[in-house]
Amino acid sequence: MLIAAAASCTSIDFEKLQPGSFSGTLIVMWVGPGASSGDGKFVFVPDPHDRLTFIRPGGKENPIVPGVMYTDGGSVPRAVQVFRGFNPWGYAPAYMVHDWIFTAHHCLVDGRKDPVYVAVSDIGFDESGVILGEAIWTLMKEKLVIRDDVVAGAITTAVRSPFAKKIWDGSPGACENSAVTEDHLREIERAVPGSTVDEARRRHLDIAGAIRSFRRASNAVEVGRVTF
């Protein structure tokens, strides 16, 4: 499937890409059972005191700082996940950066002008695949993952396939439709205080006030954390 995707899109020479740099902390939380497949619903949660940040090689562009969003890691087809290197969470920090570029793009298309979206407004679809490759290179350079140019090259190329382009193009209202729900924001805020402040402000929600009025433990479960 990945080979077919690579044949139908512009390829990327992964070996010619350069690593950038990561800083901050990645947090992924489980917030529910998800779709009928039973895989679960996962959210990238910004650490309010140590935001995950990716700086591209040369540091010329704006840093990429993901906000709260739903994520499935790398959108790797289930049939391919059995092969080494194609775990959907294998390059999780890189996938969070790539997911955020798509999320921000959908919000920009829907007319949102929030600074967090505008910061990545110059990034186009093809460039988003290059950035994913740079982020994966960075994980390899830091020896957080084993170097595998074949797998990384296949993934980097596949994210510029027609299927990925269809997701990029989205549809009107994609920003609102894909936003983390208020219920999930409250659970996240209970687990990581301060993590939803920016999102709540953008959407004019009183998440912090809601959880103060009804105190209990969070139903969200932290399933992954990486600090650079």
Image (tube, rainbow, N blue to C red):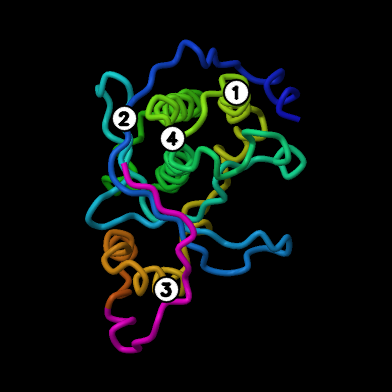
**Residue under circle 4?**
144
Q: Could you tell me if residue 115 is visible in this image?
A: yes
Q: Position of residue 25 (x, y in %)?
A: 32, 49
Task: Give the numbered dot on residue 187.
Answer: 3
Task: Give the numbered dot on residue 1.
Answer: none
Disc 3 on helix, strand or loop? helix
Q: Quote the CA–CA distance across marks 3 and 4.
A: 30 Å
Of badges 1 and 4, the one in the foreground is: 4
Q: Quote the CA–CA distance across marks 4 and 2.
A: 13 Å
Disc nearer the start of the sequence (4/2): 2
Type of the residue with mark 1: Thr
Disc nearer the start of the sequence (2/1): 2
Vertical comparison of 190 with 42: above or below: below
Of badges 3 and 4, the one in the foreground is: 4
Q: Position of residue 219 (x, y in %)?
A: 47, 76
Q: Residue at x 30, y 60 (%)?
A: 202
Task: Give the numbered dot on residue 157.
Answer: 1
Labels 3 & 1 near each other (Cβ < 8 A):
no
Name the image quarter holding residue 143.
top left
Disc 1 on helix, strand or loop? helix
Q: Position of residue 193 (x, y in %)?
A: 28, 69
Q: Position of residue 125 (x, y in %)?
A: 50, 29
